[in-house]
Amino acid sequence: MYNYHFRSSPTRINRDFPNEMESLRSQSIKIFKTALFQVDAFQAVLENLSLKGNILRIKTGSDSLKEWDLSRFKKIQVLGAGKSAAPMAAAAEVILKDRLGDGLIITKYGHGGRLSKIKIIEAGHPLPDQAGCRGTRQIVTRLQASGSGDLILFLTSGGCSALFTSPPPSISLKEKQKTISLLLKAGAPIQDLNTVRKHLSLVKGGRSARFAYPATVINLVLSDVIGDPLDIIGSGPFFPDSSSFQNALDVLWKYRLIKKVPTAISAFLKRGVRGLFEDTPQPGEICFKKVTHRIIANNRIALDAAAQTARKLGFKTFILSSQIQGEARELAKFYGALARERVQPHTLSKNPVCLLAGGEPTVTVTGPGKGGRNTELALATAIELNGLGKISFLSAGTDGTDGPTDAAGAVVDGRTCTRAFHKGIAPEDHLQNNDSYSFFKKAGGLLMTGPTGTNVMDLHILLVR
Amino acid sequence: MYNYHFRSSPTRINRDFPNEMESLRSQSIKIFKTALFQVDAFQAVLENLSLKGNILRIKTGSDSLKEWDLSRFKKIQVLGAGKSAAPMAAAAEVILKDRLGDGLIITKYGHGGRLSKIKIIEAGHPLPDQAGCRGTRQIVTRLQASGSGDLILFLTSGGCSALFTSPPPSISLKEKQKTISLLLKAGAPIQDLNTVRKHLSLVKGGRSARFAYPATVINLVLSDVIGDPLDIIGSGPFFPDSSSFQNALDVLWKYRLIKKVPTAISAFLKRGVRGLFEDTPQPGEICFKKVTHRIIANNRIALDAAAQTARKLGFKTFILSSQIQGEARELAKFYGALARERVQPHTLSKNPVCLLAGGEPTVTVTGPGKGGRNTELALATAIELNGLGKISFLSAGTDGTDGPTDAAGAVVDGRTCTRAFHKGIAPEDHLQNNDSYSFFKKAGGLLMTGPTGTNVMDLHILLVR
């Protein structure tokens, strides 16, 4: 079994397999590819934003639009931050053409490129650095300078929280980082984390909207968070915050960190509670009046595209959920139950079946091996599917990078384990050691896409003929 | 929130709820009831077996039949064992009427009753006892006495392995029990367990078919095992065994029990390996030539009936799997993801949706509380669904007994946790302590059916309007 490189020739893929299984695996890769295309950062902007004459349109639903007459605006600029900022900005340049004034985006080191009007700043991710802070200050200056004759197209994607960062003057970046890392170690969930984060920032938790007002803001969002919560993606720079300085302080109390965080942090939050600084803008505040959010790509959109392709290929298709969480191994048992149900002779439907899911399972690492959550899920599912015929399962990250590996994920079928076993590769042992990447490296089945420039979490594709 | 007794008046159920949620919960109970009816032991025999003139028919598929001309047989008798043996035998009496000679069945203490022609013996379950051994010897005598002019209708249901039991003369019941309990403690899976069990029995692993041959045997099976494996349900008295004495001995070596089991056990198996006793009949042996198996009820049949009712109630319905296994809490996360997907505004389908599943999840008990796998799953799912509107989830055992409780399971919705919380009942704490039964006892939502006389594992019903 070979590993699948997106550009490898089909003959190379097909060599030593029973055709039917191989064809199922190839079909699952095809389905994954079309899903990737639909959530490609460049493509997603083109899909959602259009300019006809002076009218700028965004889709706000499957058959609803929102329009702006660009002749009303003096200046149009593109701002934004995230790992997909560069391709998104490139698409904005293509659409807006000479109507675009200029712009500035912040992206991760190595994720930049060259654009004709929009300046690109590269900065640190996942740990913020001074380059990010400097870029953020420049964006803030631009937001503050804009007035009611300005249109700001903001581009948000995964990584925005780290890249678009600006601690208040009395707090250093290091102190802020230390606080966040203490909360992470204490096991604080994202809601608690963000409550603190938003109150240690000049731009998060809707504060950017205050800077921008009264300019018009269109925020195009590429979602990498389960359920697309606009207050959490990129820490919601233009979205109302429902928490307060007091809540942020309460979180530190709750995790018994009030005395462990740097003094500057607790002092700042306490001054906030006493009303010395303005709190984050609450829902209904006027600064949000001219802000429009639009999720241009998310896991569900990828799943819908996958479903469309699967149906074209003749599969009876069902989308389970775009919000899959939980331990990968346990999830594999569930997928195993779904798969076995469909290969039972007495329940066999005449149509081939495609079950689709997406989200972000977790892996509790206990072994010393190498692997990501996608290869781990694929290996655990391969063990569940062992011995079943005419079945395949694909699990891959839409960003093309599965954990600390160079693979996006893996594709398996009912003979993956037996084949590996005959080569002396033990599936159970590799799973036990969290060594799923090494398993597939030796046994074959890795899916190699390279970095895709987008991220809407993972896709799971189960095919049964 | 009240607990649901199957005979409680609707007005009592409806009292203090938002109508929509209550109606969803009532509908899920209605769906569960129709599923129960379809797998009712008495009903299932009537559904699958019919007599017209001299022709006895069983369904062998959705549109296929197998027929026997009863005029060819001198004597027809009903034999069998299991917790549902009595209602199954009652149905056989109804169908066969005066064509029935007589019969003998073994069931659990308290599960018997009175039949006109078939004798009922009550015996020990889950631990076998001498009453079971005596009953089994009587059945063996009847099997041995039967010839080619005999038709035996055998009735298998959950509990058959313990009730239909006959250790070889050199082994005592106690020695056999000790061996099985050592294997259970060592964590041996059902396959390994059965390999040993079948080689310590005179009737299991297809041996009963040898006694019966050349009589005709129709084995009606009510399946309480995932995937309906005929060699595992009741340890397959009439089904070929693919294991050998050597395999049984290997299992004892594998779990390092060879010196811990009673000497009589290892000595017996070793003599078996040396060929001093005939091994279990392998596939293809002549004794199986006149045996017909028919699964008359299983989890999938219950799910299909549930699906039919759900569709009639206007739900777009999807059967996930009848083979659900794995830890109940992890499963709840999955059901949570499926539920949330369907209450997202952007993915909301116009039809109300019903997702159905079944099987037998497990609970790893770490707390001191009281609960079964169904109430635990319902509580964990209630926590996942907290705050969602227009949603309900039911988890219940088809036998009406969830673990060590008097409930079949529980019904929850998006307000179950909030409502409990306001009464001072903490959902998370109860889950932590495996105290789900107590939670529902106080908070309401228990489903009380009483013993149903059937068992095809559990049903999970998720409704979203």
Image: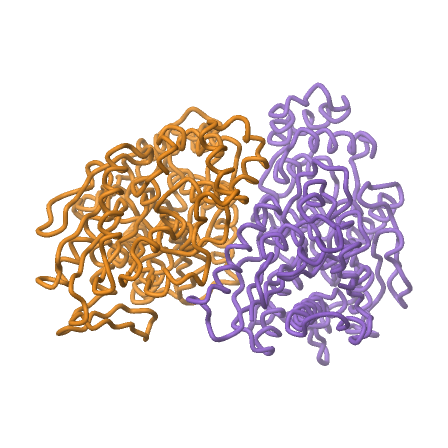
Chain colours: A orange, B purple
Q: Is residue A389 visible?
A: no
Q: Nearer the viewer, residue B430 or A143?
A: A143
Measuring from the top left, give residue A177's x and y in whole percent: 39, 31
Q: Which of A410 and A188 is in front in this view?
A: A188
Residue at image coords 30%, 63%: A309
Count of numbered circles in the view: 0
Measuring from the top left, give residue B334's x and y in whole percent: 53, 52
Residue at image coords 69%, 55%: B214
Q: Is residue A460 visible?
A: yes
Residue B102 in which image quadrant: bottom right
Up/down of A40 relative to A381, above or below: below
Residue B31 in which image quadrant: bottom right
Residue at image coords 85%, 43%: B133
Measuring from the top left, give residue B40's x and y in whole percent: 73, 66
Residue closest to the far bottom? B53
Residue at image coords 27%, 63%: A216
Q: Which of B68 and B240 is in front in this view?
A: B240
Residue B26 in which image quadrant: bottom right
- Please indicate whether residue A116 sits to the left or right of residue B91 in the image: left
Q: Nearer the viewer, residue B69 or B319?
A: B319
Quarter containing the N terminus of chain B: bottom right
- Please indicate whether residue A255 sits to the left or right of residue B105 in the image: left
Up/down of A175 relative to B391, above or below: above
Up/down of A269 relative to B380, above or below: above
Measuring from the top left, give residue A372's x and y in whole percent: 38, 36
Up/down of A393 relative to B177, above or below: below
Quarter containing the C terminus of chain B: bottom right
